[in-house]
Amino acid sequence: MAKKTVGQQETVQEVKQTAWDIVQIARHAERPNIADYITFMCEDFVELHGDRLFGDDRSLIGGFATIGGEKVMLMGHRKGRGIEENIEANFGMASPEGYRKAKRLMKLAEKYHLPVVSLVDTPGAYPGCEAEARGQAEAIAHNLEFMATLKTQMVIVITGEGGSGGALGIAVGDRILMLQNAVYSVISPEGCASILWRDGTKAALAAETLKITAGSLKSLGIIDDIIPEPKGGAHTDAAKAVAAVKKAVLDNLAVLKKIKLDTLLQQRYDKFAAMGRF
Amino acid sequence: MAWFEKAAEAPLRVPTEAVWTVCPSCKAYVEKAEWKATDKVCPRCNYHDRMGCRERVALITDAGSFKELNAQVGPNDPLKFKDSTGAYADKAKATVEKTGIGEAVLTGTAAIEKIPVVLAVMDFKFLGGSLGSGTGERILLAAEEALKLRRALIIVSASGGARMHEGIVSLMQMAKTCAATARLKEAGLPYISILTDPTTGGVSASYAMVGDLNIAEPKALIGFAGRRVIEQTIKQKLPDDFQTAEYTQSHGFIDAIVPRKEMKAFLAKILRYASGAC
Ligand SMILES: [Zn+2]
């Protein structure tokens, strides 16, 4: 970021942030996480545990929630705050049982006629031996099919890091919203740099090239709206940032609820079918 | 004469590329004529080598039955992507010219033992079989064609995953293709997925893993995360058979492992069981 010098404080906010600057904000340890959204956005939250098949992933959580009087099914990645929680939450890298729990909760949402609100914040799905053995690919793939045809309203918010397939596994919906300083990418800038540039230190360049920021994704037609953040990033004023997300979620739900379900599903199909059609 | 007797004689001859093929898996020298006769299956280790999409079509469909669809759909460059080795647009153009296939998947209508199907066959030669926007579009259109004609869809996968050069648009092809296969399933139509070497990353985590039946070729690499990424994460060496077709089947994700020579007959048999759905 540009150095602040005396007399320039007023203009410093207008200095263009690089994609790499935004990656740092998206990954900031104090950035509002799912626990903050539950605390500050929901009047009520009933966590529901387990995928009924293997276990209860602590990297991806969800349950019934009431947001501004609206009953919804809320789910999202959980990175945790502080090293102990980070480790318990596996730094937000979900395993197959996380994606299968999400699927179970979405199914329940459809049955109870509740909209789904999904908060996305993950470096990626967990690349581990057990995750492979239990079918990480299959778990994500089936969620993609499932979300495409789920018969209820679905609002997705990319709140922090939208890390590849691990993000997409809970990110198919009717509205894809993104916080101003969130990122969403097919691969991490570091990973892309080491594969395509054969040089991990080119991450900042890869971040720029991959067009992973909210503005770029809006112009590519991938996301519907950008939710503004307080100056300096969501972590500087968590209450204000969460309030903005709450408003965006409620506004979008209100619009979606007016659309007939058949039309909604057709629009959802058309939305994803059009991605990459030029 | 068995292969090993030939191999023992090998030093007497010059093992030039004109006469010998080196098995990519066990490194055995196999005579080119024999390699061709076995449809690129190693007579020593049973490795099923990568096949071009047209060779594959010839192998599993009735002669002359294949009619290509949507040949005009090709790669797009939504990010204007450039890395240290140059511009993606140039690479894509050169690949189209060199391979004579317009995208990483060839799609069309065909018959297998007289049973009409819609077929999509990926080709690893085309940018590592990566899932770009043109690939996703061709697959979506193939699924829509199957829906229109009320036929089974068969997809043969061979891919390293998403096409990084198309960034987030590539990631969205996972959602897009799965929206299409989900529609096919809602209509009660059969979808058979064949996973060949390799089927990994974003392709395994989308359409390749959601077949009514998932069928693999022997020893094919099938998985979500790359071996190196997992080894770096867990800081352990992985066993040799990790992410093989056999490993994936033993963990419950593959219905059948079918040798190349038997694939067409096997597909025809399955299609006859599924005929009530069309
Ligand atoms: Zn071999």
Image (cartoon, rainbow, N blue to C red):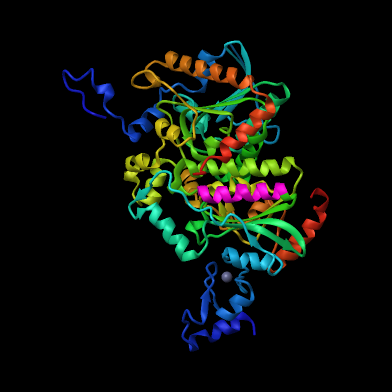
**Does residue B63 sit above or below A190 in this rendering?**
below
Q: Position of residue A114 (x, y in %)?
A: 67, 21
Viewport quadrant of the N terminus of chain B: bottom right
Q: In the current view of this chain or complex, which residue is farthest to the left?
A: A6
Which residue shows up at 74% across the image and 63% down it? B112
Nearer the observer, A11 or B73:
B73
Ligand 1 quadrant in view: bottom right
**In the displayed structure image, the side of residue A227 where residue B198 appears, left or right:** right
State which quadrant residue B90 falls in.
bottom left
Q: In the current view of this chain or complex, which residue is farthest to the bottom?
A: B12
Which residue shows up at 60% across the image and 68% down it? B55
Majority SS type along the magenta span: helix
- Segment colored magenta: B132-148
Residue A27 visible to an observer of this rendering: no
**In the displayed structure image, the side of residue A94 where residue B164 appears, left or right:** left
**Does residue A39 sit above or below B245 in this rendering?**
above
Q: Position of residue B120 (x, y in %)?
A: 63, 56
Determine if the magenta segment contains residue A164. no
Nearer the observer, B260 or A266:
A266
State which quadrant residue A5 falls in.
top left
Which residue shows up at 60% across the image and 50% down it? B139
Nearer the observer, B189 or A245:
B189
Residue A44 visible to an observer of this rendering: yes
Nearer the observer, A227 or A139:
A227
Q: Position of residue B102 (x, y in %)?
A: 51, 58
**In the displayed structure image, the side of residue A89 where residue B67 appears, left or right:** right
Q: Position of residue A99 (x, y in %)?
A: 61, 35
